Amino acid sequence: MMVNFALTPGMKNNALIEELRGKVSGEFRQQVPLYSHNEFPQHGCNLIESPMFVQPLDYKEKTPCTNAANHIKSWEHNWLSEKCVTREVIAVDRANNYAIIQHSRYQTSVCDACHRARVSLLCLNPDEIDYIPSYFLCGINNDDGLYFLHPLFRVPEELIGRTKNHGDVMSIVKWCNKEEWGFEGRIQGDVIIAEVEPRVSKMIARKDYIDEIVYDFLAGKNKMCISVKIHRKEKFKAGNWPHDLKHLMDYMKNHFPQQHIMIGDRHELSTDGYIVTEVLWPSEGNMWLTTDFNTFVVLGSELIIYHPEHPTVKKQISADKALLVSIQRGFIRDRIDD
């Protein structure tokens, strides 16, 4: 199903939910509740159908509640009348089919029914209700034609301000895609890639033989590196180590067996070469730190990405280059430079 992008500035509450209902990619149904409430969703949870994103309209509980002003029985006349806006489109980029959604979680301390429904306690004026805003980037996937909802965890406040005041949605898109690191954009789901050129920068030797070889490369303007430890039973002098990437790939394949590599939310990576899972980047004091478990370097002629919710993606790799693979900013996971 190919959906038409129909989000408009100011669309809120029920109108927004009805537009998204049944049109959100399955991958994101699992990810967004985790971000919205810092809880793992139930198995098979549907983002749009669950109380994580849309509040239920009816409860069977008979729990007494002193929250007379906004009690669940007055739901349709209070909450859904939009006195309290729980979710709203705050900006739209129509040319690129992107929108930013603000999701507000209101604080409660009332009966179970009202608590789960996020009804505010003893307050008729929504401007006086404490709430916690979170933000989502919404767009349409190129492969399945469905909406995606991308959490914006740790998004800089200045970007939110520019979006609200000037409609600058693309600055948040570029932040998500790590454009300053040279990434080209989404290739599948939240997976992003960049072409890099690792080159031998250092050989660490003991006596006459190499112990370790370091390959540097630039990601945008940022220096990163990978290293290979020479197997203790092998002897290489500095002049005997070929500098081409194919030799590095073959050496890694022969000496470091590799299992399935997963990145992000159930994206499986494979290649005819080798995937380096320990990528380093510089920190203070001339120290090198491991980026994270979601940034890899792919050596080979082709990268293949599998996912149960997306068509398989194949990306060709030039002989003298490698692919840096990571995931977008915004999810609650440690990633490069977050």
Image (cartoon, rainbow, N blue to C red):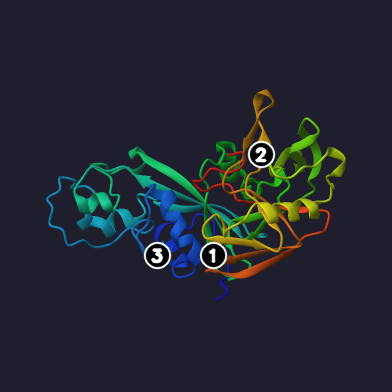
The dot on residue 147 is 1
Measured in 3D between alpha carbons, the distance from the residue under mark 2 to the one under mark 3, in whole angstroms, is: 37 Å
Measured in 3D between alpha carbons, the distance from the residue under mark 3 to the one under mark 1, in whole angstroms, is: 14 Å
Residue type indicated by callout 1: Tyr
> Can you name the residue that lies furthest to the front here?
233
The residue at 78%/36% (across/down) is 209
Where is the N terminus found, in terms of image quarters?
A: bottom right
> Can you name the residue that lies furthest to the top here?
285
The residue at 38%/66% (across/down) is 44
Tag 3 or tag 2, which sits nearer the N-term? Answer: 3
Q: Would you place residue 69 above or below residue 29 in this image? A: above
Residue type indicated by callout 2: Leu
**Mark in the foreground, 2 or 3:** 2
Residue 178 located left or right of residue 261: right
Q: Would you place residue 27 above or below residue 88 in this image? A: below
The residue at 66%/43% (across/down) is 279
* Disc 2: which residue: 280
298 or 4: nearer the eye?
298
Measured in 3D between alpha carbons, the distance from the residue under mark 1 to the one under mark 2, in whole angstroms, is: 34 Å
Evaluate whether residue 337 shows in this view: yes
